[in-house]
Amino acid sequence: MSARRPFFLAPVTAALVLALAACQPGTPDAAETSATPDAAAGVTVSDAWIRETPPNAGVAGGYLVLRSGSADRLVAVETPAAASVEIHEMSHEGGMMRMRELADGLELPAGSDVALAPGGNHLMFIDPVEPVRAGQSIEATLRFEHAPAQTVTFEVRPLAGDAPAHDAHSGH
Ligand SMILES: [Cu+2]
């Protein structure tokens, strides 16, 4: 009797596998692919932060790392926390560092990290609605040429935030 069981079970298992496989094409699998961002088209955002500003500052710098699975472009950033947000690049002009708006947005080559960081490309939050203070967070929506828009939480870091050795070790 027991010798027949494998023959009986095998077709049932095969049928189940086929039924499950048939369900896959229409099923969104964003949750599964989030662990391997390069495998999917879409943009992964990490380390989003804004530098704390002195009172009455007219602008605040925003930084983050973007990684797109396919060639894309960051074209706009919107937030209720500032009058507007511009995407700026830094360039040397006549020996001086100057910043200017990237009118066509920021290029995101497929599969590489694009870092916006102090001293380089950055987001410029113009006329913050309230002073930008360390410990707060600010939400902003990133719009891309191809990928769906994405709302990101920017953590506000202290003015000395890009020199962590100073405050991190001062206690001991
Ligand atoms: Cu700027």
Image (tube, rainbow, N blue to C red):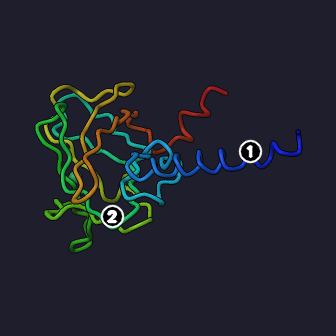
Residue 6 location in percent, x, y?
80, 47
Q: Looking at this view, name the residue that lies furthest to the bottom.
A: 94
Mark 2 vs mark 1, CA separation in Å: 54 Å
Residue 99 location in percent, x, y?
21, 60
Residue 123 location in percent, x, y?
26, 49
Q: Looking at this view, name the residue that lies furthest to the left.
A: 83
Please tell me which residue is depicted at 50% across the width and 45% down the height of the picture: 32
Label 2 is placed on what type of residue? Leu
Label 1 is placed on what type of residue? Phe
Task: Tell me: 11 left or right of 149.
Answer: right
Asked which secondary structure carries label 1, the reply is: helix
* Residue occupied by mark 1: 8
Toward which corner of the image does residue 153 lie, by quadrant? Answer: top left
Residue 17 location in percent, x, y?
59, 49
Asked which secondary structure carries label 2, the reply is: strand
Please tell me which residue is depicted at 52% across the width and 40% down the height of the picture: 164
Which of these two is toward me, 170 or 151? 151
Toward which corner of the image does residue 80 lie, by quadrant? Answer: top left
| Local crowd size for mark 1, using a 10 Å CA cut-off: few (<14), some (14–19), many (≥20) | few
Which of these two is toward me, 132 or 35? 35
Question: Under 8 Å from ligand 1: the CB of mark 1?
Answer: no
Circle 2 or circle 1, nearest the eye: 1
Which of these two is toward me, 62 or 47? 47
Q: Looking at the picture, does residue 106 appear above or below residue 150?
A: below
Which of these two is toward me, 57 or 40? 40
Q: In the rendered image, which quarter contains the C terminus?
A: top right
* Residue occupied by mark 2: 108
Question: Under 8 Å from ligand 1: the CB of mark 2?
Answer: no
